Image: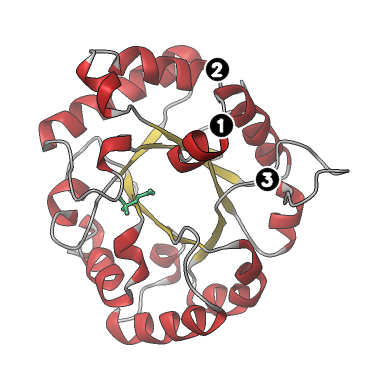
Amino acid sequence: MSSKILIANWKMNGTLDFCFSYFESLGKEVAPPMLPERARNIVFCAPFPYLFALQGRLLEKGYSLGGQDCAAYDAGAYTGEVSAAMLSDTGVSYVLVGHSERRSYLGESNEICRLKIQQAHDKGLTVIYCIGETLSQRKEGALENVLKEQIQDALPKSVTYENTLLAYEPVWAIGTGQTPTLEDIEETHMLIKALAGSHCKNYSARVLYGGSLNEKNAREILALSKVDGALVGGASLKPEKMAQIISLMPENV
Ligand code: PGA
């Protein structure tokens, strides 16, 4: 069994002090310390300004660093944007693309996501591409079509097992305390793997689950065979909760 991947998405939270004390507390909570080959699969997506400061601390412990977004363009007059090359310069090896908050607040389309994914691939970053349906889409029975479009319109032919992870994040489960049933998660992950495989031949996608995953439900969700890991938002902001989730990864149980 290849080991599962855990992504912490801090969103727009924290301060420099928070970043430093977080890893001190996490170090005390995660006992015994993880072997580097295991720790590498735990990724912290911190806000841009803190990435550089975190680089040394994270890499020393073996954890990986991720960005929460990257620009759709290489370089130039794009005020406020951060390119994939800049992320790579700060020690980042993963980047989130297409998070539902960016899709809904910033109008990010599948086409924009495609450009971002391409940029990230060109600069050697591993993409965590987020997809998922809203509650009304689910109620209308549009789940499969929504996922299909998000996959077909955004995944370039450069996707491989190594360079792209998919994160299934039902929008209605993000930050709400609600999660789909275990059967629903397993079934939807199977569907996503099939859709991704038929869009890009030879692409055997790893699919992470995200949306209200916490220290209470992590064990059963992470144990599902079609779940290749998790994307954790709110619960990842508390080092003691994150440490519990780490300890519940199947290879650590
Ligand atoms: P949540 O967020 O764990 O707080 O629901 C997940 C995410 O948005 O990535």
In whole angstroms, how far apart are the C-alphas of marks 2 and 3?
Answer: 21 Å
Q: Along the horizontal axis of the image, is 167 left or right of 243?
A: right
Which marked residue is nearer to the observer: mark 2 or mark 3? Answer: 2
From what the image shows, is residue 163 above or below residue 60?
A: above
Q: Within 8 Å of ligand 1, the CB of disc 2? A: no
In whole angstroms, how far apart are the C-alphas of marks 1 and 3?
Answer: 26 Å
**In the structure shown, which secondary structural element does the residue marked by tag 1 occupy?**
loop
Q: Find disc 1 in the rendering and name its residue.
A: 107
- Residue 31 appears in view: no
Q: Earlier in the sequence, mark 2 or mark 1?
A: 1
Q: Find disc 2 in the rendering and name its residue.
A: 153
From what the image shows, is residue 229 above or below residue 109?
A: below
**In the structure shown, which secondary structural element does the residue marked by tag 2 occupy?**
loop
Q: Earlier in the sequence, mark 1 or mark 3?
A: 1
Name the residue rendered at 61%, 22% in the picture.
111
In whole angstroms, how far apart are the C-alphas of marks 2 and 1?
Answer: 15 Å
| Residue type, mark 2 in image | Asp
Image mark for residue 124: 3
| Residue type, mark 3 in image | Gly
Q: Earlier in the sequence, mark 2 or mark 3?
A: 3
**In the structure shown, which secondary structural element does the residue marked by tag 3 occupy?**
loop
> Residue 43: where, in percent of width, then height?
46, 60
| Residue type, mark 1 in image | Gly
Which marked residue is nearer to the observer: mark 2 or mark 1? Answer: 1
Name the residue rendered at 31%, 15% in the picture.
144
Position of the N terminus by quadrant:
top left
Q: Does the residue at mark 2 contact the one at mark 1 (Cβ under 8 Å)?
A: no
Residue count near mark 3 (Cα–Cα under 10 Å), binned few <14, some 14–19, many ≥20: some
Which marked residue is nearer to the observer: mark 1 or mark 3? Answer: 1
Name the residue rendered at 17%, 64% in the picture.
253
